[in-house]
Amino acid sequence: MIRFLTGFFGALVEAWAQLRIGKLRVMLSLVGVGAAVAAMTFVIALGEVTSAIIDQEIATFAGRPGTVRIEVNPTGRGVDDDSVASDGASIGADGGLGADGSSGATEDGSQSAPEIANKIATAEANLVERYGAKSWATSYDQQLRIAFPDGTRNVQATVVSAGYATLHNTRMGQGRWFSADDEDDLSPSLVVSQGMLEQLGHTTLDGPITVHSYSPAQTTYTIVGVLKPDDLTWCEGVPEYAQDCTQTVRAYALRVPHEQWLTNEARASLPAPVLEIWAGQEQEQQVINLAKHDLDAQFGAGSTFATSNSAQTQGINTSSFTQSVTIAGVLVMVLGALSLINISMVTVRQRIHEIGVRRSFGATSRRIFFSIMLESVVATVVAGVIGIGIAIVGMRIAPLGAMLGVAVETLPPFPMSAALIGLIAATAVGALSGIIPALVAVRIKPIDAIRY
């Protein structure tokens, strides 16, 4: 093994020395190979980066890939001890509606809708704690009646836990997202859109801004952060879209302090929260099964609706695209390597006497073969590395936002798979282009080579 490695590295050093001697002709012959590697690597990287950017955009709405969404709609089937409720009406253990269809407790002991919503929230919290979920969030939608300078009107709000921003790639433009300290504040915290901030009469969040709410609770909220403004470049200057070309008006409220100010009547109308757990695409099915097993045992068979967002968050499937680009790039490199074959053949003929002398001093056919072939391999690898460097620089300076039509806030890292494909392709082409000259060199008889 040591002997083999010594011979291999010796041949490698010899190949590099020969390239340095004929560096000008080698460089000219490898321009096509380097350009092909650069183009192929850039296109493959562009496809993968585009998919990653689209995944980031989708995650804003559907959550990070591998997020499991858990909703509970109690049926009561198979539950003997506690009765459960659904859709604002009380139901018994057999799943039937209460006598009056109301949300209060019925004469048969069924639980009311507020009790069921609270029980679901508690069960979801226990599920998170039991299985040690590291990244999770709860949320539900609710209308807030907010006082604006021109009057009061409803604002669509999402009541969330602090972990919501991590799951949904929520990007802040000003201020900050909710923190654990906000749960202890007497004034509930809000994160609002840029459109809502502007309609409140502000353009920047220089400090905490308070707004008054009339429902579902009469309280004063404190704005601690503003979302990134909506990208309106798609509709600017287009008359038919002028009506829709405005910043959205919406808000996020932190769940714990928000619910503390609700009246009993408002709490009675709260929906059961939706639980989201990031499990990763490898463990999402396991989390789905555990959630259904645990929650169905408490609320009845078929109560738990748990789904993964993996199918929703798949931006672009780049596998077939990568294969097509790789094949095309290799073909271009093969054409570029033809010139390298010609130069290698000329070099071998010029070195016939040298090869004969080396064979007479004991150089084996294997050593001669590898030394000649590795000249081509080393040359194409150097060209490939230069091409990959050009592709990386191109990805950094390319206007991806304009090319993709979306605002790119965070540029994903250059995909190593694209660089690896480019390097492997360059190495393979170098090996193929070096085989013919190497075989010619091996077939030279030592005595004829010395006389040459």
Image (cartoon, rainbow, N blue to C red):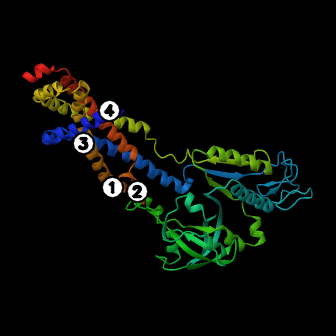
Q: Which quadrant: the C terminus?
A: top left
Q: Secondary structure at mark 4?
A: helix
Q: Quadrant of residue 351?
A: top left
> Are the residues at dot 3 and dot 2 in contact (C-beta closer than 8 Å)?
no
Residue corresponding to mark 1: 396
Amino acid at circle 1: Arg
Residue 126 screen position, x and y as percent:
73, 57
Residue corresponding to mark 4: 3
- In depth, the one of 435 and 258 nearer the eye is 435
112 in relation to 388, above or below: below
Q: Secondary structure at mark 2?
A: loop
Instruction: Indicate which disc, 3 or 1, sits on the residue closer to the N terminus.
Output: 3
Residue corresponding to mark 2: 411
Most extreme residue toward the left, as rendered?
451
Q: Residue at x 25, y 37 (%)?
A: 10
Most extreme residue toward the right, as rendered?
107
The answer for how far apart the CA atoms under marks 2 and 4 are is 47 Å
The answer for how far apart the CA atoms under marks 3 and 1 are is 20 Å
Q: Secondary structure at mark 1?
A: helix
Q: Residues within 10 Å of mark 2 (few under 14, many from 20)?
A: some
